[in-house]
Image (spheres, rainbow, N blue to C red):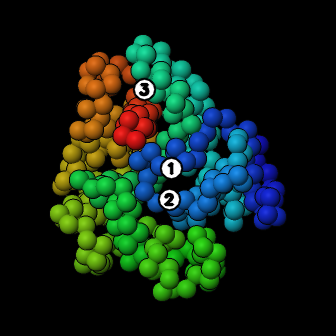
């Protein structure tokens, strides 16, 4: 992998990351593991997205086996973007390990079809808050709620500059209506004004979000200690102490927020996929230490099969 300062086809300054292998930007961002992304453009010059992570606006375009990061320094790309997109990890090794763990032919099909997916290394608090919101919700609505909450509490990272979405001046009124460039609220932000959650219409999840904020802010649930333990089982047990957090939400947070790659979220959809496509033979415990990566392969693969079948 090579990281260097360059210019794109339009002459805009960017940091180029080349030789990225099978990585797919669109599959990684749109496979259901994160909600703060926006598709900016798609065409012969590549596919471009933006997201906000760790206090940075990440605007990135993929062209084949090259990524172009705009508005960031080489150091920011190396220290923030490469870890965030798990580009510092050899997923060929992970895929091989998964396929050695199980001889189910359908699993190999899924791994081959979705091998461009990487598990994002998200902020644990943001992942926890987001997946509480995700309960009994669809992705468009989840994303809208998160944008509204962020604009209510967060800092506008594009203030005084240009909107990365439409390249227009970033005015306060337009930015608040959009909400995509704001930092994510901390537990303390939420507790300083709990009623600030109401305009986003979180519904029954409101009490769960406040409880999570209280427990994390007080230290009763220490995200730092959970991360240091490095165990999916421990992570899930600790997070389930929060009101409204069950096995599925806790497993999602373990996988996407704490990097516990053995965590395997199971919901009604995954149970159906197992019965319909895997004959009930798919057992998470048999998939080894990267079972969570296998889950994402399966989710992406089966979702595309369902889409094609419904056409």
Reading the chain from its start, which is encountered first: label 3 or label 1? 1
Mark 1 surroundings: few (<14), some (14-19) or many (≥20) residues within 10 A = many
Q: Residue 37 carries which label?
A: 2
* Foreground: disc 3 or disc 1: 1
Q: In the rendered image, is residue 158 in sight?
A: yes
Pointer 2 with pointer 1, Cβ within 8 A? yes
Q: Which of the 4 image quarters holds residue 282? A: top left
Secondary structure type for disc 1 = helix
Q: Residue furthest top?
A: 103
- Tell me: residue 49, above or below residue 101: below
Picture residue at 79% right of the left edge, 51% below the top? 4
| Quadrant for the N terminus in the image | top right
Picture residue at 79% right of the left edge, 63% below the top? 10
Depth check: give the residue in front, 162 or 290: 162
* Residue that numbered label 3 is attached to: 289
> Gap between marks 2 and 1, in whole Å?
7 Å
> Gap between marks 3 and 2, in whole Å?
28 Å
> Gap between marks 3 and 1, in whole Å?
23 Å
* Foreground: disc 3 or disc 2: 2
Reading the chain from its start, which is encountered first: label 3 or label 2? 2
Secondary structure type for disc 2 = strand
Mark 2 surroundings: few (<14), some (14-19) or many (≥20) residues within 10 A = some
Picture residue at 35% right of the left edge, 47% below the top? 253
| Quadrant for the C terminus in the image | top left
Q: Residue 29 carries which label?
A: 1
- Could you tell whether 97 is left or right of 65 in the image? left
Q: Where is residue 16 in the image (x, y as percent from the top left)?
A: 75, 51
């Amino acid at each position: 992998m090579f990281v260097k300062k360059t210019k794109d086809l339009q002459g805009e300054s960017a940091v180029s990351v080349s030789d990225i292998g099978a990585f797919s930007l669109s599959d990684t961002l749109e496979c259901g593991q994160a909600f703060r992304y926006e598709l900016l453009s798609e065409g012969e010059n590549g596919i471009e997205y933006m997201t906000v992570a760790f206090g940075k606006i990440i605007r990135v375009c993929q062209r084949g086996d090259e990524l172009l990061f705009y508005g960031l320094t080489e150091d920011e790309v190396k220290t923030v973007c490469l870890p965030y997109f798990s580009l510092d990890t050899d997923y060929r090794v992970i895929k091989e390990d998964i396929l050695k763990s199980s001889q189910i032919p359908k699993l190999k099909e899924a791994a081959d079809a979705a091998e461009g997916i990487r598990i994002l290394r998200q902020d644990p608090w943001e992942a926890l808050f987001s997946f509480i919101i995700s309960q009994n919700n669809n992705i468009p609505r989840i994303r809208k709620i998160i944008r509204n909450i962020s604009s209510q509490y967060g800092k506008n990272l594009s203030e005084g500059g240009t909107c990365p979405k439409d390249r227009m001046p970033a005015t306060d009124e337009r930015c608040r209506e959009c909400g995509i460039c704001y930092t994510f609220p901390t537990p303390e932000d939420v507790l300083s004004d709990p009623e600030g959650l109401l305009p986003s219409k979180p519904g029954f999840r409101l009490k769960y979000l406040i409880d999570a904020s209280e427990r994390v802010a007080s230290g009763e649930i220490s995200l730092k200690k959970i991360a240091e333990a490095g165990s999916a089982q421990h992570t899930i047990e600790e997070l389930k102490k929060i009101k409204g957090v069950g096995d599925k939400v806790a497993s999602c947070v373990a996988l996407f927020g704490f990097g516990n790659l053995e965590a395997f979220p199971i919901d009604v959809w995954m149970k159906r996929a197992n019965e319909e496509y895997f004959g009930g033979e798919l057992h998470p415990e048999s998939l080894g230490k990267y079972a969570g990566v296998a889950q994402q392969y399966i989710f992406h693969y089966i979702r595309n099969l369902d889409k094609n079948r419904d056409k």
